[in-house]
């Protein structure tokens, strides 16, 4: 038992601080080991990034190369192999991108599956319907948000409007039963 009772609150506070320092402090730290592959259309590119619209999604995501070699003064730079791949890939190509999450989405490999305009089946528009599995993250009047398995972002899905006035009962209600 401690002889100095004034030290007890200090030791307790020190123990709490140690617990918080040992736990991850942000979503970025937790996601540091996340990695994956995405297949989609390269919608834009810059000197050091690409924008890819994954199949089945409406928004493009930005991917940048990994940083290697430390600080710039110590020779640090974006991965030269990925920088070369970014220069060579054409916008509107169908690509497969391997990525890791290190503060942001980082490209680790780019594979061109199909060049734009060469007449392949990938150039044809994809249907605006389909199925996927995931978790419901939110629900409202006539809509739900679902996070597809394997993705971090939810997609908002609207029920089909089958008639009636906007303030009436026009949504396909059986979808929300």
Image: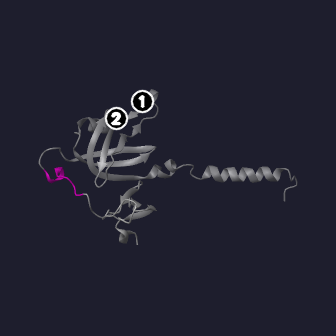
Assign the N terminus to one quadrant of the image: bottom right
In the rendering, at what x and y percent does residue 75 appear? 42, 29
How far apart in space, not on screen, are marks 2 and 1 (Cα)? Answer: 17 Å
Q: What secondary structure predominates along the stretch shown in magenta? A: loop
Kindly identify the residue that appears in the image at 43 percent across and 44 percent down: 104
In the rendering, at what x and y percent does residue 46 appear? 31, 34
Given the current orientation, which residue lies at the most extreme top position? 73
Q: Does 55 lie within the magenta span?
A: no
Residue 49 placement: quadrant: top left
Q: What residue is pinned by disc 2?
A: 48
Kindly identify the residue that appears in the image at 42 percent across and 47 percent down: 101
Measured along the vertical axis of the image, is residue 65 above or below residue 96?
above
Q: Pick the residue in front: 171 or 118.
A: 171
Q: Tell me: 85 left or right of 103.
A: left
Residue 134 placement: quadrant: bottom left
Element under disc 1? loop
User: Circle 2: is it few (<14), some (14-19), or many (20+) Cα within 10 Å?
Assistant: some
Which of pointers 2 and 1 indicates the residue nearer the eye?
2
Element under disc 2? loop
Q: What residue is pinned by disc 1?
A: 75
Kindly identify the residue that appears in the image at 36 percent across and 42 percent down: 62
User: Circle 1: is it few (<14), some (14-19), or many (20+) Cα within 10 Å?
Assistant: few
In the rendering, at what x and y percent does residue 18 appear? 67, 51
Assign the C terminus to one quadrant of the image: bottom left
Measured along the vertical axis of the image, is residue 177 above or below residue 94?
below
Q: Pick the residue in front: 155 or 42.
A: 155
Q: Tell me: 111 left or right of 103.
A: left
In the rendering, at what x and y percent does residue 108 appear? 34, 45
Kindly identify the residue that appears in the image at 54 percent across and 49 percent down: 26
For the record, the magenta segment spans 120-127
């Amino acid at each position: 038992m401690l002889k100095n009772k004034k030290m007890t609150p200090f030791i307790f506070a020190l123990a709490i601080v140690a617990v918080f320092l040992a736990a991850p402090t942000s979503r970025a730290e937790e996601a540091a080991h996340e990695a994956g592959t995405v297949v989609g259309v390269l919608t834009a590119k810059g000197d050091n990034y690409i924008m890819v619209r994954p199949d089945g999604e409406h928004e493009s995501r930005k991917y940048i190369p990994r940083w290697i070699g430390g600080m710039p003064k110590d020779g640090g730079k974006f991965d030269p192999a990925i920088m070369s791949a970014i220069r060579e890939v054409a916008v509107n190509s169908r690509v497969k991108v391997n990525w890791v999450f290190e503060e942001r989405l980082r490209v680790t490999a780019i594979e061109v599956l199909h060049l734009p305009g060469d007449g392949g089946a990938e150039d044809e528009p994809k249907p605006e319907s389909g199925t996927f599995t995931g978790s419901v993250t939110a629900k409202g009047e006539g809509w739900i948000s679902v996070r597809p398995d394997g993705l971090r972002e939810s997609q908002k899905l609207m029920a089909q409007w089958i008639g009636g006035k906007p303030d009436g009962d026009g949504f396909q209600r059986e979808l929300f039963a």
